[in-house]
Amino acid sequence: GEDVEQSLFLSVREGDSSVINCTYTDSSSTYLYWYKQEPGAGLQLLTYIFSNMDMKQDQRLTVLLNKKDKHLSLRIADTQTGDSAIYFCAAFQTGANNLFFGTGTRLTVIP
Amino acid sequence: GAVVSQHPSRVICKSGTSVKIECRSLDFQATTMFWYRQFPKQSLMLMATSNEGSKATYEQGVEKDKFLINHASLTLSTLTVTSAHPEDSSFYICSVRVANTGELFFGEGSRLTVL
Protein backbone atom coordinates (compact mmCIF):
# COMPACT_ATOMS: atom_id res chain seq x y z
CA GLY A 1 0.00 0.00 0.00
CA GLU A 2 0.86 3.64 0.26
CA ASP A 3 0.68 6.11 3.13
CA VAL A 4 -0.03 9.67 2.14
CA GLU A 5 0.18 12.22 4.92
CA GLN A 6 -0.75 15.86 5.24
CA SER A 7 -1.07 18.30 8.08
CA LEU A 8 -4.71 18.81 9.00
CA PHE A 9 -4.98 22.58 9.24
CA LEU A 10 -3.45 25.70 7.76
CA SER A 11 -4.45 29.30 8.30
CA VAL A 12 -3.16 32.21 6.25
CA ARG A 13 -4.04 35.84 5.79
CA GLU A 14 -5.64 36.99 2.58
CA GLY A 15 -2.99 38.01 0.09
CA ASP A 16 -0.27 35.86 1.60
CA SER A 17 1.02 32.65 0.03
CA SER A 18 -0.17 29.27 1.27
CA VAL A 19 2.00 26.19 1.20
CA ILE A 20 0.38 22.83 1.75
CA ASN A 21 2.71 19.89 2.23
CA CYS A 22 2.27 16.21 1.57
CA THR A 23 4.49 13.16 2.00
CA TYR A 24 4.05 9.73 0.51
CA THR A 25 5.84 6.46 1.03
CA ASP A 26 5.84 4.54 -2.24
CA SER A 27 8.43 5.73 -4.73
CA SER A 28 6.65 3.88 -7.55
CA SER A 29 3.81 6.40 -7.53
CA THR A 30 3.65 7.80 -11.03
CA TYR A 31 1.14 10.60 -10.79
CA LEU A 32 0.65 12.99 -7.90
CA TYR A 33 -2.48 15.08 -7.67
CA TRP A 34 -3.87 18.02 -5.78
CA TYR A 35 -7.61 18.29 -5.31
CA LYS A 36 -9.80 20.94 -3.74
CA GLN A 37 -13.00 20.14 -1.95
CA GLU A 38 -15.44 22.83 -0.98
CA PRO A 39 -18.16 22.06 1.58
CA GLY A 40 -20.73 19.60 0.31
CA ALA A 41 -19.14 19.39 -3.12
CA GLY A 42 -17.18 16.77 -4.99
CA LEU A 43 -13.49 16.97 -5.59
CA GLN A 44 -12.08 19.42 -8.06
CA LEU A 45 -8.82 18.53 -9.73
CA LEU A 46 -6.46 21.48 -9.32
CA THR A 47 -3.31 20.16 -10.85
CA TYR A 48 -1.16 17.11 -11.14
CA ILE A 49 2.48 16.32 -11.72
CA PHE A 50 4.22 13.34 -13.21
CA SER A 51 6.83 11.71 -11.07
CA ASN A 52 9.60 12.60 -13.53
CA MET A 53 8.97 16.33 -13.04
CA ASP A 54 10.08 18.45 -10.12
CA MET A 55 7.97 21.54 -10.63
CA LYS A 56 4.79 22.60 -12.34
CA GLN A 57 3.26 26.04 -12.37
CA ASP A 58 -0.30 26.91 -13.31
CA GLN A 59 -1.34 30.52 -12.69
CA ARG A 60 -1.39 30.97 -8.90
CA LEU A 61 -0.55 27.35 -8.22
CA THR A 62 2.95 25.92 -8.01
CA VAL A 63 3.59 22.26 -7.35
CA LEU A 64 7.00 21.14 -6.16
CA LEU A 65 8.00 17.50 -6.07
CA ASN A 66 11.02 16.16 -4.24
CA LYS A 67 11.05 12.57 -5.37
CA LYS A 68 14.05 11.66 -3.26
CA ASP A 69 12.28 12.73 -0.08
CA LYS A 70 8.84 11.74 -1.42
CA HIS A 71 7.59 15.21 -0.61
CA LEU A 72 5.00 17.15 -2.55
CA SER A 73 3.87 20.70 -1.94
CA LEU A 74 1.24 23.02 -3.30
CA ARG A 75 1.84 26.74 -3.15
CA ILE A 76 -1.06 29.12 -3.69
CA ALA A 77 0.08 32.66 -4.39
CA ASP A 78 -2.01 35.65 -3.31
CA THR A 79 -4.43 33.47 -1.36
CA GLN A 80 -8.04 34.61 -1.49
CA THR A 81 -11.01 33.87 0.76
CA GLY A 82 -12.42 31.73 -2.03
CA ASP A 83 -9.44 29.44 -1.63
CA SER A 84 -10.73 28.31 1.77
CA ALA A 85 -11.40 24.60 1.36
CA ILE A 86 -9.94 21.19 2.06
CA TYR A 87 -7.00 20.27 -0.14
CA PHE A 88 -6.18 16.64 -0.78
CA CYS A 89 -3.02 15.27 -2.24
CA ALA A 90 -3.17 11.86 -3.85
CA ALA A 91 -0.63 9.41 -5.22
CA PHE A 92 -1.45 7.06 -8.07
CA GLN A 93 0.34 3.78 -8.58
CA THR A 94 0.02 2.67 -12.16
CA GLY A 95 0.91 -0.94 -11.48
CA ALA A 96 -1.59 -1.34 -8.69
CA ASN A 97 -4.09 0.93 -10.45
CA ASN A 98 -4.81 2.47 -7.08
CA LEU A 99 -5.15 6.03 -5.94
CA PHE A 100 -4.22 6.83 -2.36
CA PHE A 101 -5.40 10.02 -0.72
CA GLY A 102 -4.03 12.02 2.14
CA THR A 103 -6.29 13.06 4.98
CA GLY A 104 -6.74 16.53 3.53
CA THR A 105 -5.57 19.93 4.78
CA ARG A 106 -8.22 22.41 5.76
CA LEU A 107 -7.09 25.83 4.54
CA THR A 108 -8.66 28.81 6.25
CA VAL A 109 -8.05 32.23 4.73
CA ILE A 110 -8.40 35.07 7.18
CA PRO A 111 -9.66 38.34 5.64
CA GLY B 1 -18.13 21.74 -17.98
CA ALA B 2 -18.40 18.55 -16.01
CA VAL B 3 -16.92 15.48 -17.60
CA VAL B 4 -18.26 13.08 -14.99
CA SER B 5 -21.88 13.18 -13.97
CA GLN B 6 -23.03 11.50 -10.80
CA HIS B 7 -26.67 10.98 -9.88
CA PRO B 8 -28.44 11.42 -7.55
CA SER B 9 -26.59 14.08 -5.61
CA ARG B 10 -28.66 13.43 -2.50
CA VAL B 11 -30.76 10.47 -1.50
CA ILE B 12 -32.59 9.58 1.66
CA CYS B 13 -33.87 6.07 2.12
CA LYS B 14 -35.28 3.80 4.77
CA SER B 15 -33.20 1.13 6.41
CA GLY B 16 -33.36 -2.14 4.51
CA THR B 17 -33.92 -0.64 1.08
CA SER B 18 -31.44 -0.54 -1.78
CA VAL B 19 -30.09 2.57 -3.44
CA LYS B 20 -28.45 2.90 -6.84
CA ILE B 21 -25.96 5.63 -7.68
CA GLU B 22 -24.95 6.28 -11.28
CA CYS B 23 -21.66 7.60 -12.57
CA ARG B 24 -21.48 8.69 -16.19
CA SER B 25 -18.49 9.70 -18.23
CA LEU B 26 -19.69 12.47 -20.51
CA ASP B 27 -16.79 13.34 -22.79
CA PHE B 28 -14.84 10.17 -23.17
CA GLN B 29 -15.01 6.44 -22.85
CA ALA B 30 -14.01 5.15 -19.49
CA THR B 31 -12.64 1.68 -19.24
CA THR B 32 -11.90 2.20 -15.56
CA MET B 33 -13.93 4.00 -12.95
CA PHE B 34 -13.28 4.25 -9.24
CA TRP B 35 -15.72 4.42 -6.35
CA TYR B 36 -14.85 6.16 -3.11
CA ARG B 37 -16.51 6.72 0.20
CA GLN B 38 -15.90 9.65 2.46
CA PHE B 39 -16.75 9.60 6.12
CA PRO B 40 -17.32 12.92 7.87
CA LYS B 41 -14.11 14.86 8.41
CA GLN B 42 -12.05 12.05 6.94
CA SER B 43 -10.28 11.47 3.68
CA LEU B 44 -11.61 9.51 0.76
CA MET B 45 -11.45 5.77 0.94
CA LEU B 46 -11.19 3.78 -2.25
CA MET B 47 -13.91 1.15 -2.25
CA ALA B 48 -13.50 -0.54 -5.60
CA THR B 49 -12.17 -0.25 -9.10
CA SER B 50 -14.79 -0.75 -11.76
CA ASN B 51 -13.69 -2.22 -15.08
CA GLU B 52 -15.94 -2.15 -18.10
CA GLY B 53 -17.25 -5.57 -18.97
CA SER B 54 -15.71 -7.37 -16.04
CA LYS B 55 -16.17 -7.75 -12.31
CA ALA B 56 -15.12 -4.91 -10.07
CA THR B 57 -12.06 -5.20 -7.87
CA TYR B 58 -12.90 -4.45 -4.26
CA GLU B 59 -10.57 -3.09 -1.63
CA GLN B 60 -9.97 -5.07 1.51
CA GLY B 61 -12.76 -4.70 4.00
CA VAL B 62 -15.38 -3.64 1.44
CA GLU B 63 -18.26 -6.09 1.18
CA LYS B 64 -18.88 -6.89 -2.46
CA ASP B 65 -22.35 -8.25 -1.76
CA LYS B 66 -23.24 -5.06 0.04
CA PHE B 67 -21.88 -2.65 -2.52
CA LEU B 68 -22.73 -3.97 -5.96
CA ILE B 69 -20.87 -2.37 -8.83
CA ASN B 70 -21.85 -2.73 -12.44
CA HIS B 71 -19.88 -1.28 -15.33
CA ALA B 72 -21.85 -2.45 -18.29
CA SER B 73 -20.83 0.22 -20.78
CA LEU B 74 -17.89 2.50 -21.47
CA THR B 75 -19.75 5.51 -20.12
CA LEU B 76 -21.72 4.20 -17.15
CA SER B 77 -20.90 2.58 -13.84
CA THR B 78 -23.41 2.05 -11.06
CA LEU B 79 -22.99 1.46 -7.35
CA THR B 80 -25.89 -0.18 -5.56
CA VAL B 81 -25.94 -0.11 -1.79
CA THR B 82 -28.04 -3.13 -0.90
CA SER B 83 -30.12 -3.45 2.27
CA ALA B 84 -28.86 -0.09 3.43
CA HIS B 85 -28.34 0.61 7.11
CA PRO B 86 -27.71 3.90 8.92
CA GLU B 87 -23.98 3.14 9.09
CA ASP B 88 -23.94 3.19 5.28
CA SER B 89 -24.80 6.88 5.38
CA SER B 90 -21.91 8.61 3.72
CA PHE B 91 -20.69 10.62 0.77
CA TYR B 92 -20.00 8.40 -2.22
CA ILE B 93 -17.86 9.70 -5.08
CA CYS B 94 -16.92 8.18 -8.40
CA SER B 95 -14.00 9.09 -10.60
CA VAL B 96 -12.76 8.32 -14.07
CA ARG B 97 -9.14 8.20 -15.12
CA VAL B 98 -8.10 9.30 -18.58
CA ALA B 99 -5.77 6.61 -19.85
CA ASN B 100 -3.29 8.71 -21.80
CA THR B 101 -2.86 11.64 -19.41
CA GLY B 102 -3.53 10.10 -16.02
CA GLU B 103 -5.94 12.85 -15.10
CA LEU B 104 -8.69 11.92 -12.75
CA PHE B 105 -12.09 13.50 -13.04
CA PHE B 106 -14.53 13.21 -10.20
CA GLY B 107 -18.26 13.26 -10.00
CA GLU B 108 -19.91 15.72 -7.65
CA GLY B 109 -20.64 12.98 -5.18
CA SER B 110 -23.81 11.47 -3.79
CA ARG B 111 -24.80 11.98 -0.18
CA LEU B 112 -26.67 8.98 1.13
CA THR B 113 -28.67 9.21 4.31
CA VAL B 114 -30.22 6.03 5.64
CA LEU B 115 -32.94 6.53 8.21
Image (spheres, coloured by chain):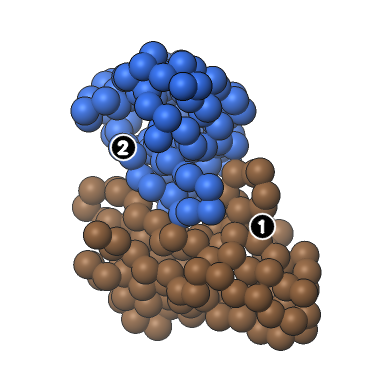
Chain colours: A blue, B brown
Q: Quadrant of residue B67?
A: bottom right
Q: Residue at x 29, y 26 (%)?
A: A61
Q: Is residue B83 left or right of residue B72?
A: right
- Mark toward the viewer: 1 or 2: 2
- Whole-angstrom CA distance, mark 1 to mark 2, is 29 Å
Which mark is on residue A17? none
For the residue labelled by badge 2, is the local secondary structure a helix, a strand or a loop? strand
Q: Position of residue B35 (x, y in %)?
A: 51, 62
State whether residue A64 appears in this view: no
**Residue underneath mark 2:** A47
Q: Nearer the viewer, residue B51 or B104?
A: B104
Q: Residue at x 37, y 77 (%)?
A: B76
Instruction: Output the chain of dot 1.
Output: B
**Residue underneath mark 1:** B60
Work out which quarter of the rendered image holds the C terminus of chain B and state it: bottom right
Assess disc 1: are there few (<14), some (14-19) or many (≥20) residues with their C-alpha within 10 Å of its C-alpha.
few
Q: Quadrant of residue B12?
A: bottom right
Work out which quarter of the rendered image holds the N terminus of chain B and state it: bottom left
Q: Residue at x 73, y 77 (%)?
A: B84
Q: Nearer the viewer, residue A100 or B1?
A: B1
Q: Position of residue B90 (x, y in %)?
A: 65, 61
Q: Is residue B9 left or right of residue B99?
A: right
For the residue labelled by badge 1, is the local secondary structure a helix, a strand or a loop? loop
